[in-house]
Amino acid sequence: GQNNIILVDDFIGSGQTVLGRIKTIKAQFDGSNITDYTIRVKALSSTQAGLDNLIASGVHVTAQKIIKKGIDDFYDAPTAAEHRARMLAIESLLSPRYISGGEEREMPSLGYNGAQAVYCRENANTPNSVFPVFWWPFKADGAERKVVLVRAMGDA
């Protein structure tokens, strides 16, 4: 019989997590000599770049809401460059990294893979694709800072 697998996610940033999950599922099915299956991905929200990345990788994916880049997709190139420079100046006030469980985590400048996401859900974890100024809890001197959005920092 046909095995239909549907992966559901609340937010797709770069698409890397989805690609990793699909790779794991394919390895499990292929390891069991199961070839009659499909994998589809349904998301509440996705960045346009993440959606494009998945489609380019041959993934059947749909999203209810597509998030544009918070700077680059709203301004002409010279104005966007000015705004990116301002955001980088703001980010320079934040710690470029922090240590968690012995592992060093880098602040994802402009959001993971430069996603420039402006996104949140009430009572949900903030994606690392969101501009870190909203959720990165450490100042350049290492002191903690108050944040507007909350993110579990295990994989910052």
Image: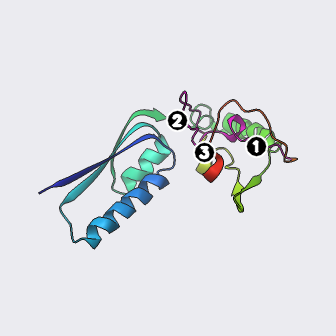
For the residues carrying marks 1 and 3, which lies nearer the camera in this image? 3
Q: Which type of secondary structure does the marked residue at label 1 adopt?
A: helix
Q: Which type of secondary structure does the marked residue at label 3 adopt?
A: loop
Task: Give the residues drawn in magenta, as a range.
Answer: 117-140
Q: Nearer the viewer, residue 95 or 90?
A: 95
Amino acid type of disc 3? Asn
Q: To which residue does mark 2 refer?
A: 68
Mark 1 to mark 3: distance in Å? 16 Å
Mark 3 to mark 2: distance in Å? 15 Å
Q: Can residue 97 be spotted in the picture?
A: yes
Q: Are marks 1 and 2 in contact (CB under 8 Å)?
A: no
| Position of residue 35 in the picture relative to residue 100 (left or right) | left
Amino acid type of disc 2? Lys
In the image, residue 47 lies at what x, y percent? 49, 40
For the residues carrying marks 3 and 2, which lies nearer the camera in this image? 3
Instruction: From this view, report whether residue 51 is shown above or below residue 83.
Output: below
In the image, residue 49 lies at what x, y percent? 49, 46
Residue depicted at 74% across the width and 37% down the height: 82
What is the residue that sits farthest to the front in this orientation? 101
Crowding around mark 2 (Cα neighbors within 10 Å: few <14, some 14 to 19, many 20+) is: some
Residue 21 magenta? no
Q: Nearer the viewer, residue 42 or 101?
A: 101
